[in-house]
Amino acid sequence: MAEDARIITVKKIDEERLTNERLAGADREARAESARLAAQADAARVARDAETAQIAAQTEADRVKQENIAKMDAAQNAATWQSVTRSADGCCPDRSRSSETRERR
């Protein structure tokens, strides 16, 4: 009888050990799956952040490009205006002479 009790006890201990090992294995698998899902979510977030940053950079580049085009147009218009003004000042030399002639009289 004592031998039977010992065998039963050893079997129970082995069953408990196997149950604990199975539970520990399932727990490890659950933690690994959780970590995998977290890493996947983090990778998706990083990809979204990178896309957002790229869109923001492109938008800023487009804005600066438009600003530079506007500045170049303004400078070109100013240069054209100066050229027209200078041409107009020099187009009628008689007028300036006639005013000098009037002053002499």
Image (cartoon, grey):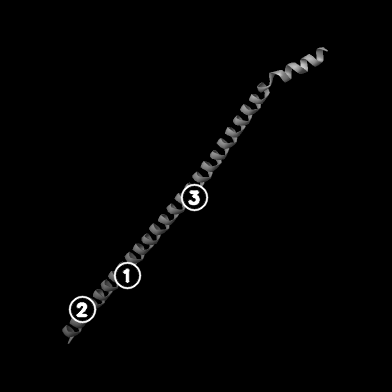
Tell me where residue 84 sits by quadrant.
top right
Tell me, for residue 10, which label it has, or none. 2
Q: Nearer the viewer, mark 3 or mark 1?
A: 3
Left or right: residue 50 versus residue 65 is left
Tell me where residue 26 sits by quadrant.
bottom left
Whether residue 105 is situated above or below residue 28 in the rendered picture: above
Tell me the residue that label 1 is attached to. Answer: 27
* Residue at far bottom of view: 1
Q: Nearer the viewer, mark 3 or mark 2?
A: 3
* Callout 1: SS: helix
What amino acid is labelled 1 in the image?
Answer: Asp
Mark 2 to mark 1 CA distance (whole Å): 25 Å
Residue 2: x and y in percent read 18, 84
Residue at the image position 73 percent from the left and 20 percent from the top: 95
What amino acid is labelled 2 in the image?
Answer: Val
Residue at the image position 77 percent from the left and 15 percent from the top: 100
Q: Which comes before the other along the chain, label 3 or label 1?
A: 1
Residue at the image position 39 percent from the left and 59 percent from the top: 44
Mark 3 to mark 2 CA distance (whole Å): 68 Å
Residue 104: x and y in percent read 81, 12
Of 75 and 45, the residue lying toward us = 75
Residue at the image position 57 percent from the left and 40 percent from the top: 70
Of 39 and 93, the residue lying toward us = 93
Local crowd at mark 3 within 10 Å, few (<14), some, or many (≥20)? few
What amino acid is labelled 3 in the image?
Answer: Ala
Tell me the residue that label 3 is attached to. Answer: 56
User: Pointers 3 and 1 in contact (CB under 8 A)?
Assistant: no
